[in-house]
């Protein structure tokens, strides 16, 4: 898919060719952006590149001041600050946006995507761009989408099938959907704070957890849970979010600069993420981790009841149909 075709679904009608005359037309603007990631995270690096591009293409008249490391709280707090007019931009995952727009809960459905190509076709294509408009009534809107890999289980003993998970205690980010996933696989969900997972694994309070490869490696959880089962049950993206009133007040020239910079940040973030995953897997293997390739079909079948639950909501059912159609 050509990069510029990705802009179609965003309905941001603005010229994307920049030259010196644009600089003269752009008004001065400084925006505050806060997120809870550290400065080595690939999403922060992508956002930082976007800020540099915005400043450059506006001739220094547009700036984004970034406040990382949770200086203004977590995603829920920063989203609420945007709603209250106290912040201009933030980063949040699709699951963190569920509270504000239930449509984003669709990403919590396991095995919604056939493969990575299907996921990216949805995220960066017409369906994903349309979904990004669903929060406008809440006072903010995503202007970029970032990949966050696939979440898989890592455990203290090998897991080759759902049968191996029976009786296990698995740490999850506790939501009705994630808890149900664990229960349908025969295990028990454990809503332990993220910072306590290492000790809980070490002391066998829990038998495993679930996350992507970079998080597994960077948290050192691989030291106390040596088996990474590549079941890849969910793919939950991150979003770069801007205040809707701020966006609406921008000139066409300002929105054009932001739109192109946001698009470029998506491409850059994907490159960084792929490199991060490859490096994390290599380092994990060097530290004695066993990566287990499994037949995903038994996992899919065990989790099918979740689709029946989600389809009870007609609006969510419509999004499921659109996503599934994009993969055919």
Image: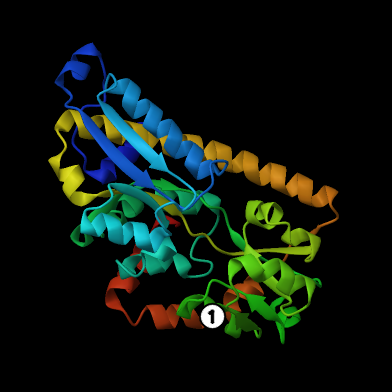
Task: Estimate the x, y position of residue 248 in percent, counting from the top left.
Answer: 15, 44
Colour theme: rainbow
Identify whether 159 is placed above or below 6: below
Count of numbered badges drawn on the protein = 1
Q: Is residue 292 left or right of residue 140?
A: right
The residue sitting at 22% across, 35% down in the picture is 255
Give the quarter of the image for residue 143. Answer: top left
Q: Quadrant of the N terminus?
A: top left
Q: Quadrant of the C terminus?
A: bottom left
Asked if one can make out residue 164 in the rendered structure from this viewpoint, the answer is yes
Identify whether 56 is placed above or below 287: above
At numbered mark 1, what does the secondary structure look like: helix, strand or loop? Answer: helix
Asked if one can make out residue 292 in the rendered structure from this viewpoint, the answer is no
Nearest the eye: 266 or 72: 72
Identify whether 178 is placed above or below 125: below
Q: Is residue 64 left or right of residue 243?
A: right
Nearest the eye: 94 or 52: 52
Q: Which residue is mark 1?
A: 179
Task: Estimate the x, y position of residue 65 in percent, counting from the top left.
Answer: 36, 37
The residue sitting at 72% across, 87% down in the picture is 167
Task: Estimate the x, y position of residue 307 in percent, counting from the top left.
Answer: 45, 78
The residue sitting at 52% across, 69% down in the picture is 110
């Amino acid at each position: 898919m050509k990069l510029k075709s990705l802009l179609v679904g965003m309905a941001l009608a603005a010229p994307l060719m920049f030259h010196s005359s644009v600089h003269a037309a752009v008004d001065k603007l400084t925006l505050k952006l806060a997120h809870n990631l550290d400065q080595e995270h690939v999403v922060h690096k992508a956002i930082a590149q976007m800020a540099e591009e915005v400043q450059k293409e506006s001739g220094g008249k547009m700036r984004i001041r970034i406040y990382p490391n949770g200086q203004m709280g977590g995603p829920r707090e920063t989203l609420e600050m945007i709603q209250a007019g106290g912040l201009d931009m933030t980063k949040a995952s699709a699951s963190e946006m569920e509270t504000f727009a239930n449509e984003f809960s669709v990403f919590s459905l396991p095995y919604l995507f056939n493969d990575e190509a299907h996921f990216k076709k949805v995220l960066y294509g017409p369906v994903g761009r349309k979904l990004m408009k669903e929060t406008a009534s809440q006072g903010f809107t995503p202007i970029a989408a970032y990949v966050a890999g696939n979440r898989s289980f890592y455990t203290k003993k090998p897991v080759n099938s759902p049968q191996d998970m029976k009786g296990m205690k698995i740490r999850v980010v506790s939501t009705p959907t994630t808890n149900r996933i664990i229960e349908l696989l025969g295990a028990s969900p454990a809503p332990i704070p993220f910072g306590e997972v290492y000790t809980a694994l070490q002391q066998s309070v829990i038998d495993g957890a679930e996350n992507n490869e970079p998080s597994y490696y960077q948290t050192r959880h691989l030291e106390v849970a040596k088996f990474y089962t590549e079941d890849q049950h969910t793919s939950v993206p991150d979003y770069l979010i801007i205040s809707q009133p701020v966006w609406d007040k921008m000139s066409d020239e300002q929105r054009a600069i932001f739109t192109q910079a946001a698009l470029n940040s998506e491409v850059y973030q994907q490159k960084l993420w792929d490199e991060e995953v490859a490096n994390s897997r290599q380092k994990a293997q060097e530290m004695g981790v066993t990566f287990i390739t499994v037949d995903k079909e038994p996992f899919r079948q065990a989790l099918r009841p979740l689709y029946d639950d989600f389809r009870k909501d007609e609006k969510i059912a419509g999004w499921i149909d659109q996503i599934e159609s994009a993969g055919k």
